[in-house]
Image (tube, rainbow, N blue to C red):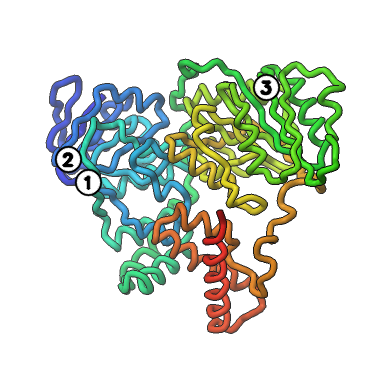
């Protein structure tokens, strides 16, 4: 492990290895960083601003458990301003700094990466002169190429309440957006600066537009070491929960797939729903056939996937929870393979690759996932049981987004794996979305966005993210509707936005 101590992200003060100072040829932090990486590719490089009043924790190897991890902690500064939220509303942009949280937003205060991992990015970023810009670029591109990037409070011992100041200039922000996003987002960023910041950074906009893009660059990290291990204290017991309504034939096929598993679930919890108070169960096969696992069958007359999953979670006793849909199919080794990868990557939530019949895999690499599949994920129960599906989002869309954000707020990362696949049959009948608009159908004006999406934005987005979401929504929806007069369109969208805000406030 090598400690790279710097002053204000610019000047190297010392480089320490095994308790002794080592020589370096240049005091510039970026130049020295690349030099040390080249000389010691097998070492973990830890950077720290010597002006920061915080002590490093003793064993940082517990954080950097494999070579595909990059982590930092914001104590006094974060490089990019929160105005990055104008053009990016993914969870990674707005981390909860008090817990381990997936984010590419790296801080120069304290952080680390394996030297040979950083070198994978040198051919793209070797001309970057600012260290903050460099580590954020590595994080942003790396996260799309199987690098796990975290805000990690455990890098330091207990410290005072953090205070964050942005170090990047407006010009650097525009350059970063130009290099790491589609160029069209520069126009959104410029508009938001004019409207909300009361600034006109025209020169920054023009210069950035001609910056070389890194948006689609591929980085191969497949040769880096990710040791196979078993997570301590876990028994590999898996409980499966399935809410279902009106799909007995599909559900039986799911049970047949579970019966064929090389690693049986310990328990299957089915919540069958039928709003007809005089109805009887359609799932006779539960009792009429033999199954190699315990089945807990709830038959209720209250509909809704959120309520059903919350009810099912009350019966969880296994170490892992498989959130499954009632219309999926999977291979006989899906549970075994998923558990192997959960331990292999040392993660607590795996989002399976869910494809429809005839579809091909779209994302080919393991990556930190911005979403959460409420019917396609396996999660460590100790984290999942700290969360609930919000019934404010019942019959709408977004309950899976909300649950995923709850998981992250408890320090649980969600990782997508392309090789752990299930097939989603998309059953044409049954399901839970039938009453989506019931709560606002009486309005002559349709809310935009949906009140459930507005509820999520108000709960989880920063001010900048909400504003950026509004601007991008107005722009994207313009070509999908009939009003082509821009003034009338804006007036109409303002009314629909206001209605959505009002209706979202009435959600429980």
Q: Is 482 situated above or below 321?
A: below
On the image, the x and y values in percent for residue 405 come to: 49, 44
Image-quadrant location for residue 82: bottom left
Residue on which disc 3 sits? 267
In this rendered view, identify the residue nearer to me: 352 or 281. Answer: 281
Pinpoint residue 158: horizontal percent, then vertical percent: 23, 32
Residue neighbourhood size for the residue with mark 3, other residues' Cα within 10 Å, grouped as few (<14), some (14–19), many (≥20): many
Q: Nearer the viewer, residue 162 or 181?
A: 162
Q: Quadrant of residue 323?
A: top right
Residue 52 circle label: 2
Q: Earlier in the sequence, mark 3 or mark 1?
A: 1
Q: Are marks 3 and 1 in contact (CB under 8 Å)?
A: no
Any part of residue 264 in sight: yes
Q: Which residue is disc 1 drawn over?
A: 76
Q: Nearer the viewer, residue 399 or 135?
A: 399
Give the Cα distance between marks 1 and 2: 7 Å
How far is the residue under mark 3 from the one under mark 2? 50 Å
Task: Say left or right for 406 vs 20.
Answer: right
* Residue at (55, 15) in percent of width and height: 235
Q: Secondary structure at mark 1?
A: loop
The answer to which of 485 and 209 lies nearer the viewer is 485
Q: CA distance from mark 3 to mark 1?
A: 47 Å
Point out the tag, 3 or 2, that comes first from the N-terminus. Answer: 2
**Left-right relation of 285 to 29:** right
Tell me which numbered mark, 1 or 2, is placed earlier along the sequence.
Answer: 2
Judge from the rendering whether residue 368 lies leftward or rightward of residue 85; answer left or right.
Answer: right
Query: Are circles 1 and 2 on residues that touch, CB within 8 Å?
Result: yes
Which is closer to the viewer, label 3 or label 1?
3
């Amino acid at each position: 492990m090598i400690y790279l101590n710097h002053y204000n992200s610019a000047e190297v003060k010392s480089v320490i290895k095994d308790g002794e100072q080592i020589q370096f040829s240049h005091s510039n932090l970026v130049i020295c960083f690349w030099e040390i990486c080249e000389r010691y590719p097998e070492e973990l490089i830890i950077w720290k601003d010597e002006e920061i009043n915080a002590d490093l924790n003793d064993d940082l190897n517990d954080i950097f458990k494999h070579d595909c991890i990059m982590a930092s902690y914001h104590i006094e500064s974060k490089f990019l301003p929160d105005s990055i939220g104008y053009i990016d509303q993914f969870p990674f942009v707005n981390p909860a700094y008090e817990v381990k949280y997936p984010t590419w937003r790296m801080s120069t205060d304290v952080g680390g990466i394996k030297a040979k991992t950083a070198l994978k990015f040198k051919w793209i970023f070797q001309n970057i002169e600012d260290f903050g810009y460099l580590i954020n670029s590595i994080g942003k591109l790396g996260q799309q190429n199987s690098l796990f990037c975290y805000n990690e409070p455990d890098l330091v011992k207990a410290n005072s309440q953090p205070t964050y100041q942005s170090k990047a200039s407006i010009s650097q922000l525009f350059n970063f957006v130009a290099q790491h996003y589609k160029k069209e987002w520069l126009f959104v960023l410029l508009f938001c600066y004019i409207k909300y910041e009361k600034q006109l950074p025209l020169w920054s906009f023009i210069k950035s537009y001609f910056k070389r893009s890194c948006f689609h660059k591929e980085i191969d990290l497949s040769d880096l070491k990710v040791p196979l291990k078993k997570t301590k204290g876990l028994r590999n017991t898996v409980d499966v929960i399935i809410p279902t309504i009106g799909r007995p034939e599909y559900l039986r096929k799911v049970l047949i797939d579970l019966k064929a598993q090389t690693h049986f679930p310990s328990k299957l919890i089915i919540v069958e729903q039928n709003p007809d108070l005089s109805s009887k169960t359609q799932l006779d096969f539960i009792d009429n056939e033999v199954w190699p696992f315990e089945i807990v069958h709830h038959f209720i007359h209250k509909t809704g996937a959120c309520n059903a999953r919350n009810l099912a979670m009350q019966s969880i006793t296994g170490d892992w929870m498989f959130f499954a849909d009632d219309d999926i199919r999977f291979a006989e080794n899906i549970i075994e393979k998923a558990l192997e990868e959960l331990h292999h990557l040392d993660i607590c939530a795996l989002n399976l690759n869910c494809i429809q019949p005839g579809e091909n895999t779209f994302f080919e690499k393991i990556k930190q996932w911005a979403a959460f599949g409420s019917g396609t994920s396996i999660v460590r129960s100790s984290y999942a049981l700290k969360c609930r599906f919000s019934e404010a989002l019942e019959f709408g869309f977004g309950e899976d987004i909300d649950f995923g954000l709850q998981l992250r707020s408890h320090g649980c990362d969600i990782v997508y794996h392309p090789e752990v696949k299930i097939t989603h049959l998309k059953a044409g009948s049954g399901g839970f979305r039938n009453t989506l608009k019931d709560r606002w159908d009486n309005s002559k004006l349709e809310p935009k966005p949906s009140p459930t999406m507005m509820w999520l934005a108000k709960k989880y987005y920063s001010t900048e993210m909400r504003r950026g979401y509004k601007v991008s929504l107005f722009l994207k929806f313009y070509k999908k509707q009939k009003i082509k007069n821009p003034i009338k369109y804006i007036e109409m969208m303002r009314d629909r936005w206001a209605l959505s805000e009002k209706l979202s406030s009435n959600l429980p």
